[in-house]
Image (cartoon, grey):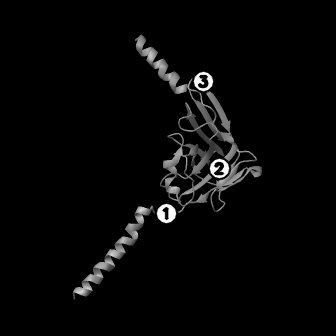
Amino acid sequence: MRYFLITTGLLTAGALSATEYVFQNFDAVIRDRLGIVWGTQLDVEIGAFSSGFTPTLQNYGSWRANFVTESAPGYYVGPALGGPEFSATLHLADNSLLAAGTQLKVWVHTSTGFAGGAQTALFSDTSWLVVTNSPTDVLTRYYDFSGITSATFGTIDFNNNLASTVAVTSIPEPSTYGLFFGLPCLGLALLSRRRRSR
């Protein structure tokens, strides 16, 4: 029984010992690419892209695999759902995943399979930085939009508390190109061979 209590205490302490990065906002309203205020929930994540990966709209399909963040995303809800409200967190027990000084980003996007078509926005701010994380102390750092927040994709208008997303076109991976172009070419080759045999 004593062993169980000690083990439980260690596990609890381990779970709490981390630097918590929290992004929250209760003012900014997000609009879609047509300027219409989002009437449904969006996923919000705070984190950073892996070293050497530059996010573009062309490689959007690879963002998920290269974005270091929590396993479960936060959220944005618009005025129709009682917002606007952003919430996203990131816990780092040490600096093995993200080095001190790493520029954090806030990634806002429609959830997978959203019927209205995928849209995204990516925001950064020079004040959103990873610190030296302690494995023993609990530290919470709060982030929000500011006058120096910029949008890599989408737009941000800090003075009017407005932001927007951009549409994301699904682009086939290089391995898929062969499927699109290879099958028609194979069909032409077979047709040509059949004509010659006649």
> Amino acid under label 1?
Ile
**Residue 186 location (% of width, % of height):** 32, 75
Instruction: Label 1, secondary structure: give it.
Output: loop
Q: Which mark is residue 137?
A: 3
Residue 105, percent across and down?
62, 46
Quarter of the image with the C terminus is bottom left
The residue singled out by tag 2 in the image is: 123
Left or right, 52 with respect to 25, comes to left
Give the farthest residue toward the right.
159
Mark 3 residue type: Asp
- Spatial CA distance of label 1 from label 3 is 44 Å
Q: Identify the image quadrant of the N terminus.
A: top left
The front one of 15 and 30 is 15
- At a point 54% along the width and 41% down the height, the residue shown is 69
Q: Are marks 2 and 3 in contact (CB under 8 Å)?
A: no
Dot 1 or dot 3: first in sequence order is: 3
Residue designated by label 1: 171
Location of residue 139 in the rendering, given as x and y in whole percent from the top left corner: 63, 28
Disc 1/disc 2 C-alpha distance (Å): 23 Å
Task: Answer with mark 1 or mark 2, whichever residue precedes in sequence.
Answer: 2
Identify the residue at image location x=77%, y=50%. 159
